[in-house]
Image (spheres, coloured by chain):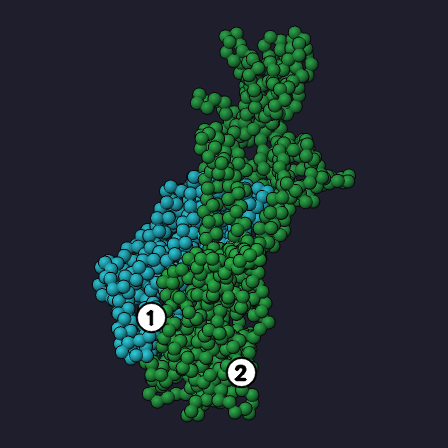
């Protein structure tokens, strides 16, 4: 089993899920294992790895002769393997590896142009390097985020996640219903421990402790406090706090699942279309009106929100001086829209970052440009074309290119012909040798239209869809001057161009602005947001809240003096946990004042112990690790084979901890002040040897256990 | 476009940044001096503690009882040390009905997750306990504080001059970023953390970062493209800066952890590290402290980073009509996030704690850097607002 494969690297503390604890720990279990699990775990030593006696299955059991035996064997094997795989999949280690893999798998998509995000770059790569592209295609590298292998990783991760959440949620509910586990026998082995001697009666100290803990909003179990008047030598109080951590962790992981589902729903039901609208014209939200449209597989076109809008005006504001000359300051499209059944339009404006919500649809402003208005009178004196033609911006100064295609043209000879004009529209015209005609500023300060002219066949009837912004000149002939040089003309608004050979007149009437809009309807956004908020809240709770237990024990000693012991155990080590214990101990002082013993050196430094309680503030949290301590709520020393927490509960909490008086240096009896702790080393081994037969920390295991048995 | 007065203000802000750089450079020299003075002291507390551990083990071995209990014995010596050397908790004065009574606080004994190194004392800091070194250290901190005030003032001035969040291009982002990192550092110091050792690496990188900002990344741009005009610029980018700066501090501690951890392991296995390594690492906090410090930062910032990404998604939904489009910037913030999530999981997984988790944390921070520099400068991304 992976968790046990490397005992030495399991961390010096050895709290790392040794042996059978491994799987529990990886599931954050705090509940005792079921017998079935125990059994399975016990078998795991000889898990599928092989090397089993011949004839035995990987999961034990001899194959009985006959069909029944074979079937039973197969069934056992199948179930065993399925269970093994599930166990693997839901183990923390595999989750970690999958997370890591997912991060790696995400990388190529940011390096290789993706078909969805940057189709142009992808097409360029395909053209420039076909061999590489075919390899990429085979590996789905142009579509990383919907590729089989990427999906496999995240689906496995989410399977693992769900496999992780369910048992944990269930255990958590169990913990909420149960009582805080009773005080372990050896409190001095807990991560934080304190003790002192007092003249107060054990019961008084405990009652006060119970009250204190309750006031600090711990869940308190005072059932081991001796009843008033009872002749008990002592008792204990158990308390636990910080359940929100576990809850937060669960909420976080569940929220991840919610988000995934929301993403999936969003991808299946979304729709998104783009439309270029010239000022003065409008748009109706139906499929046919879109320039481009894409939608998820489950999207129903009838679900398109019904509305129309007109683009009344488009405002663009550019910086006119300084280092940012020409950069945009603001774009605003003023529109009037009508929803289904509206008689009166609603005015609204759409800006970048401020989409307009119309019903379920959102209208975004994506881009803008100019559309020169031209009129072409043909060879017969008829108007063959008139209207705005959107030109496409090529740079930030809105140098734009475009094509005017005229199909209904009749030549001077009376024969139908087709004409095309190709060229530039520059809002602030400039002409240089290197760049030719271009624009120097995005506002129309000196607008000019520069055109070549063609006639012939536009190739529109070939049935192959054509890009309206590009001209296919294969079947066309360029108009030339007497020297056979291509004709080119620069027009200012209002100017006319007499075409040669009585082919007619082209007039540059003026220009309009246009804007591109994206209309999208998305599904699942609300849920994605709920998931996201849940994830953050859950995370914060789970990383900032400490789950911890506190125990107080008071025992009457032989000399009539009461020994009070307090210990706390965080789900993970934390600076706040000992701090809190110290505060609780302080709060208990009035009820159980510390006995000053002779030889006590009161002059000692008042600083808080640096080594122990430094870093008090900061996130209340340490090592999220260690499920092990939790695992064994009743305390490490008790978890001998066959004694689950429950068994431990039935036992007598035991007298004064065994660490006492065993002649260790630095114990209470030695220093006599009641302040020196037990040897931290003794405590160090504590939660680790929780598990019998631990492979992890053999050092810690044997010694302390043999000692415990003495009790 | 700036008005003349605003342009003047912007220039003034830049001047503050330049001045801050000079003061950082002085602080840098002071930190170096502190380290140099500190090297005179021959502290070897780590080796002593480790040897004491070994001796303690051997000693109690004779005892018979402890012989079977290696770990216990190892720390036994520490128990002794604790009793002698560790101070009692603070005495707390409780007032009751006019009469004051001093209560003694019972001492709390704690253990960390790596008990074998638990008893190692933190290094004394760069000055190595040397009085003169310490003086220079204090000078360095004062200079850092002064430089920070100038630096921060420069950022604020910039914000006022351009009338928007001062992080809309890489120049601004970089200056704000290092200001927050220094603020974090000073904050930890003010909170009483023993992090003075971070001063030298931090000021070095701050100088580098500011140097890059005022040369390579510098741009006269003060405009905000319409796509950035949103409150989310404050929230999303502001948080990203805080996260990056804090993750950076975590990363420095993680790198230090790796060095220090190797040093301790070498000592523990009886080796002798090089003189330079000993001199420097001996003065650092223990691997346990460094690891804790780094973890706390990373764990506390991770939810914030999550929120940063979510805020970005909400913004993208407003600006571009989709909350997630696998844009390189989005991809790399996800990778960074997954990296830190892997780190947090690693800390909870057997056999992955310690060095392996540390490598993950460093990898995650490298992803953050790639996201910042790599994507801004080289990738064809909707997010390319570097201004360079
Ligand atoms: C999409 C995948 C996952 C992500 C992004 C993720 C993220 C995280 C994060 C950030 C934490 C730290 C918060 C905390 O300590 O409470 C965490 C904790 C945890 N995760 Fe996951 N997780 C994922 C999947 C899983 C899976 C599959 C498992 C089970 C095998 C799992 C088990 C745990 C456990 C047990 C903790 C608590 C550790 C502790 O409290 O010490 N997670 N997870």
Quarter of the figure with residue B133 = bottom left
Q: Is residue A343 above or below residue A633?
A: above
Q: Is residue A494 left or right of residue B116?
A: right
Under 8 Å from ligand 1: the CB of mark 2? no
Residue B382 place in picture, x, y as percent:
51, 40
The reply to whether callout 2 and callout 1 are in contact (CB within 8 Å) is no
Q: Is residue A454 visible?
A: yes
Q: What residue is drawn where x is 52% and y is 56%?
A: A77
Q: A108 or B58: nearer the eye?
A: B58
Q: Secondary structure at mark 1?
A: loop
- State which chain disc 1 sits on: B
- State which chain disc 2 sits on: A
Distance between mark 2 and mark 1 Cα atoms: 35 Å
Q: Is residue B346 visible?
A: no
Residue B205 place in picture, x, y as percent:
35, 51
Residue A186 place in picture, x, y as percent:
43, 79
Residue ID for mark 2? A224
Q: What residue is drawn where x is 55% and y is 58%?
A: A69
| Chain letter matching colour cyan | B
Q: A432 or A293: nearer the eye?
A: A293
Residue ID for mark 1? B119
Look at the image and give the colour of chain A: green
């Amino acid at each position: 089993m992976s968790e046990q494969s490397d005992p030495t690297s399991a961390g010096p503390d050895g709290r790392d899920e040794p042996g059978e604890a491994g799987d529990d720990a990886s599931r954050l279990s705090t509940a005792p294992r079921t017998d079935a699990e125990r059994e399975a775990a016990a078998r795991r030593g000889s898990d599928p790895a092989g090397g089993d006696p011949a004839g035995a299955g990987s999961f034990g059991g001899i194959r009985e002769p006959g069909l029944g035996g074979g079937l039973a064997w197969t069934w056992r094997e199948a179930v065993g393997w399925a269970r093994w795989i599930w166990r693997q999949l839901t183990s923390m280690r595999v989750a970690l590896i999958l997370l890591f893999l997912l991060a790696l798998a995400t990388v190529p998509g940011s390096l290789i142009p993706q078909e969805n995000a940057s189709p142009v770059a992808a097409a360029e790569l395909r053209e420039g390097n076909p061999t590489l592209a075919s390899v990429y295609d085979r590996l789905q590298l142009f579509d990383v985020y919907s590729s089989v292998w990427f999906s496999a990783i995240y689906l496995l991760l989410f399977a693992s996640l769900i496999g992780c959440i369910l048992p944990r949620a269930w255990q958590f509910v169990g913990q909420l219903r149960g009582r805080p586990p009773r005080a372990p026998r050896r409190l001095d082995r807990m991560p934080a421990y304190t003790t002192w001697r007092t003249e107060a009666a054990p019961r008084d100290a405990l009652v006060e402790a119970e009250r204190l803990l309750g006031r600090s909003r711990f869940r308190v179990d005072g059932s081991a406090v001796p009843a008033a008047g009872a002749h008990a030598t002592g008792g204990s109080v158990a308390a636990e706090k910080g359940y929100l951590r576990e809850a937060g962790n669960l909420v976080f992981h569940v929220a991840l699942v919610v988000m995934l589902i929301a993403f999936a729903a969003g991808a299946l039901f979304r729709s998104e279309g783009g439309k270029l609208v010239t000022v003065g014209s409008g748009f109706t939200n139906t499929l046919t009106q879109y320039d481009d449209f894409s939608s998820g597989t489950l999207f129903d076109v009838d679900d398109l929100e019904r509305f129309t809008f007109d683009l009344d005006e488009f405002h663009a504001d550019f910086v006119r001086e300084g280092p940012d000359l020409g950069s945009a300051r603001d774009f605003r499209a003023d529109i009037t829209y009508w929803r289904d059944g509206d008689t009166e339009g609603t005015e609204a404006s759409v800006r970048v970052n401020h989409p307009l919500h119309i019903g379920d649809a959102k209208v975004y402003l994506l881009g803008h440009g100019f559309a020169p208005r031209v009129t072409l009178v043909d060879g017969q004196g008829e108007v063959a074309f008139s209207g705005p033609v959107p030109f496409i911006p090529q740079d930030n100064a809105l140098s734009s290119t475009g094509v005017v295609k005229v199909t209904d043209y009749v030549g001077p000879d009376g024969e139908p012909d087709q004409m095309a004009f190709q060229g530039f529209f520059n809002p602030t015209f400039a002409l240089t040798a290197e760049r030719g005609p271009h624009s120097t500023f995005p506002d129309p300060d000196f607008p000019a239209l520069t055109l070549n002219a063609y006639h012939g066949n536009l190739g529109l009837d070939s049935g192959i869809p054509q890009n309206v912004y590009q001209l296919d000149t294969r079947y066309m002939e360029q108009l030339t001057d007497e020297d056979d040089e291509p004709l080119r003309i620069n027009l200012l608004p209002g100017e006319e161009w007499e075409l040669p050979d009585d082919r007619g007149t082209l007039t540059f009437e003026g220009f309009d602005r246009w804007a591109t809009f994206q209309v999208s309807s998305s599904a699942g956004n609300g849920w994605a947001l709920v998931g996201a908020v849940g994830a953050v809240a859950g995370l914060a709770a789970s990383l900032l809240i400490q789950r911890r237990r506190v125990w107080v024990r008071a025992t009457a000693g032989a000399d009539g003096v009461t020994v009070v012991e307090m210990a706390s155990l965080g789900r993970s080590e934390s600076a706040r946990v000992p701090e809190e214990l110290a505060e609780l101990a302080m709060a208990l002082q009035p009820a159980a004042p510390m006995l000053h013993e002779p030889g006590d050196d009161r002059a000692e430094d008042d600083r808080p112990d640096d080594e122990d309680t430094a870093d008090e503030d900061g996130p209340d949290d340490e090592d999220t690790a260690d499920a092990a301590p939790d695992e064994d709520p009743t305390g490490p020393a008790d978890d001998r084979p066959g004694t689950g927490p429950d068994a431990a509960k039935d036992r007598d909490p035991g007298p004064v901890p065994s660490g006492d008086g065993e002649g260790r240096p630095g114990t209470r009896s030695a220093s006599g002040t009641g302040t020196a702790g037990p040897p931290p080393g003794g405590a160090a081994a504590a939660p680790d040897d929780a598990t019998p037969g631990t492979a992890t920390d053999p050092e810690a295991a044997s010694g302390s256990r043999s000692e415990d048995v003495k009790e | 476009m700036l008005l003349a007065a605003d342009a003047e203000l912007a220039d003034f802000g830049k001047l503050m940044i330049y001045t801050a750089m000079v003061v950082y450079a002085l602080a840098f020299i002071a930190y170096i001096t502190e380290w140099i003075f500190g090297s005179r002291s021959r502290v070897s507390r780590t080796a002593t503690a480790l040897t004491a551990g070994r001796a303690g083990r051997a000693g109690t071995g004779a005892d018979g009882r402890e012989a079977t209990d290696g770990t216990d014995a190892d720390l036994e010596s520490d128990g002794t040390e604790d009793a002698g050397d560790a101070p009692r908790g603070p005495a707390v004065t409780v007032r009751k009905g006019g009469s004051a009574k001093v209560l003694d606080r019972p001492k709390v004994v704690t253990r960390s997750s790596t008990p074998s190194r638990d008893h190692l004392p933190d290094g004394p800091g760069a000055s190595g306990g040397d009085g003169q070194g310490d003086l220079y250290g204090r000078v360095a901190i004062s200079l850092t504080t002064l430089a920070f005030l100038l630096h921060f003032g420069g950022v604020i001035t910039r914000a006022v001059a351009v009338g928007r969040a001062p992080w809309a291009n890489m120049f601004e982002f970089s200056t704000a970023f290092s200001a927050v990192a220094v603020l974090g550092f000073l904050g930890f110091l003010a909170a009483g953390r023993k992090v003075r050792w971070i001063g030298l690496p931090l000021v070095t990188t701050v100088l580098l970062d500011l140097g890059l900002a005022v040369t390579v990344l510098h741009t006269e741009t003060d405009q905000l493209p319409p796509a950035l005009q949103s409150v989310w610029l404050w929230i999303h980018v502001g948080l990203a800066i805080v996260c990056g700066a804090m993750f950076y501090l975590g990363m420095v501690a993680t790198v230090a952890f790796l060095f220090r951890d190797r040093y301790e392991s070498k000592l523990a296995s009886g080796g002798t590290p090089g003189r330079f390594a000993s001199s420097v690492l001996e003065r650092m906090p223990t691997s346990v402290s460094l690891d804790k410090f780094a973890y706390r930062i990373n764990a506390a910032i991770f939810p914030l980073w999550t929120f940063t990404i979510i805020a970005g998604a909400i913004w993208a939904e407003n600006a571009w009509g989709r909350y997630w489009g696998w844009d390189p910037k989005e991809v790399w913030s996800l990778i960074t996030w997954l990296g830190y999530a892997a780190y947090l999981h690693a800390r909870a997984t057997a056999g992955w704690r310690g060095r392996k988790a540390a490598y993950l944390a460093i990898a995650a921070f490298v992803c953050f850097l790639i996201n910042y520099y790599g994507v801004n400068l080289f990738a064809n991304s909707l997010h390319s607002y570097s201004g360079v």
